Image (cartoon, rainbow, N blue to C red):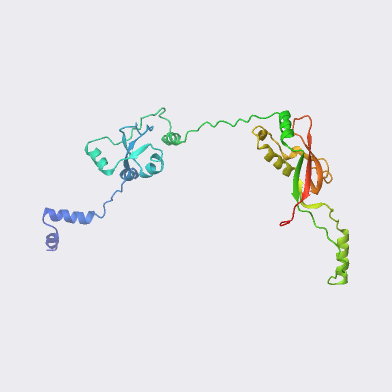
Amino acid sequence: MASLGRSTLLPQCTSCLRRVTQLTWGSLQQVRGKSKAAREAERNIVVKLLQDVPRFGRAGGSYIPLNPATMRNRWFPSRLADYVPAVQSKKLRAEGVEITRDTTFGVRDRLEEVEDEEDDFFQQPKHYVRPIEIDLLSPERSMELLNTFVPPTIDFARQPIEQDKADGRPRYGASDAADILTAATMANQPKPSANGIYGSVSNADIASTIKAALAHNDEAARVLLSDGDISFVTGHEGDDTSRVKQLGMFRVQIQIPGAKEPITRNIRIRAKAEPGA
């Protein structure tokens, strides 16, 4: 009786057997996902080649599938291909037009990596840049132009250092010791020259002024003059012949490297006028 009861619970028709089988074993079946290549193929769009591209196809009438990011970032800005609208893409497929890349087109060496060929293709062409040619003047000609365009005297204006004048009134400090220390410090400090100026006039200042004068002539503007080509003959302090720090009239030498003899010019440093004077 027990066996008869169990048999009565089993499905009796074919459709019931099929349904029970699907419910029992369907959950145990493994569902394979799509491969990466298949997923990428679904994302590809149809483009029309405007230029010959190795391993892809020939320009003019070639339709190929391409990754949207590659088209957006590289191909379309480089005008290698053009977008094909979705309506036209469906029409091409309906007409049986072949939409595939030609991996053998333009291949010179089958052992060459595809990525390397694509990178070489997308490299920007190297344009020839012609070097700048400067027709240099001879040292003798440069000195002739300097002698012609540089005036005998070059003027500069600087602010003179004001001299402290004793007013006869006693100076009081916080204490007698402070007064003694202040007096000793002032006695040890060197007194500024009566013609001292704030800052200085250097050979760089003179070179800049001379270059501005030479700029008004096309040939003279080609004279190459540096700060080291100018040195003070008078008025400098010690061995530093690159600047003077006082009012007065001084002489400088100007000599281009390679020239036989220098030329001399006067540098006049005058007191700068007070504003509103």
Rendered location of residue 47, percent (x, y): 32, 39
Seen as rendered, the residue at the extreme top is 108
Rendered location of residue 124, percent (x, y): 47, 36
| 167, above or below 58, in the image | below
Seen as rendered, the residue at the extreme bottom is 175
Rendered location of residue 261, percent (x, y): 79, 31
Q: Is residue 224 left or right of residue 35?
A: right
Q: Is residue 197 left or right of residue 4?
A: right
Q: Is residue 59 left or right of residue 216?
A: left
| 9, above or below 101, in the image | below
Q: Residue at x 88, y 71 (%)?
A: 176
Q: How many marks?
A: 0
The foreground one among 149 and 115 is 149
Rendered location of residue 29, percent (x, y): 26, 51
Screen quadrant of the N terminus: bottom left
Q: Is residue 181 left or right of residue 92?
A: right
| 8, above or below 98, in the image | below
Locate residue 24: give its quadrant.
Answer: bottom left
The foreground one among 52 and 130 is 130
The foreground one among 109 and 2 is 109
Locate residue 77: give its quadrant.
Answer: top left
Screen quadrant of the C terminus: bottom right
